[in-house]
Amino acid sequence: RDFCLSRGLGDVYKRQDIATNQLQLAIKQKQLVINLLQLALMLLHVVTLLLRLVAMMLIKLHKMQNSAKSILILLVAY
């Protein structure tokens, strides 16, 4: 009788270990998803900054072209 009782408790402990391992795995998976989402957010931030930089460069280039055209017009006029 004691053998059956101790065997039954052993099975319970094994099931608890399996459940604990599954829970730990689920927590690690969720943490991985959180880390990936944070990385994606950082990458979006970098892309946003790069797009702003490109926009600023294009605006400066456009202004420079307009200035060059104005200088050429002034030179041709005289």
Image (tube, rainbow, N blue to C red):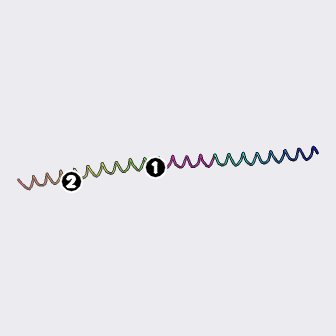
Q: Nearer the viewer, residue 36 or 57?
A: 36
At horizontal 34% and vertical 48% (from top left) the residue drawn is: 53
Distance in Å between CA atoms under marks 2 and 1: 33 Å
Q: Nearer the viewer, residue 37 or 7?
A: 7
- The image position of residue 55, as x and y in percent, is 31, 50
Counting the numbered discs, the total is 2
- The image position of residue 63, as x and y in percent, is 22, 50
CB contact under 8 Å: marks 2 and 1: no
Q: Which mark is residue 25?
A: none
At horizontal 88% and vertical 44% (from top left) the residue drawn is: 6
Q: Which residues are magenta?
A: 28-40
Q: Is residue 74 magenta?
A: no
At horizontal 94% and vertical 45% (from top left) the residue drawn is: 1
Q: Nearer the viewer, residue 8 or 78?
A: 8
Q: Main secondary structure of the magenta part?
A: helix
Q: Amino acid at mark 2?
A: Gln
Q: Is residue 34 magenta?
A: yes
Q: Which residue is mark 2?
A: 65
The local secondary structure at tag 2 comes to helix
Horizontal side of residue 56 vs 38, given as left or right: left
Horizontal side of residue 54 vs 16, given as left or right: left
Callout 1: few (<14), some (14-19), or many (20+) C-alpha neighbours within 10 Å? few
Q: Earlier in the sequence, mark 2 or mark 1?
A: 1
Q: Which mark is residue 43?
A: 1
At horizontal 39% and vertical 49% (from top left) the residue drawn is: 48
Callout 2: few (<14), some (14-19), or many (20+) C-alpha neighbours within 10 Å? few
Q: Amino acid at mark 1?
A: Leu
- The image position of residue 12, as x and y in percent, is 81, 46
The local secondary structure at tag 1 comes to helix
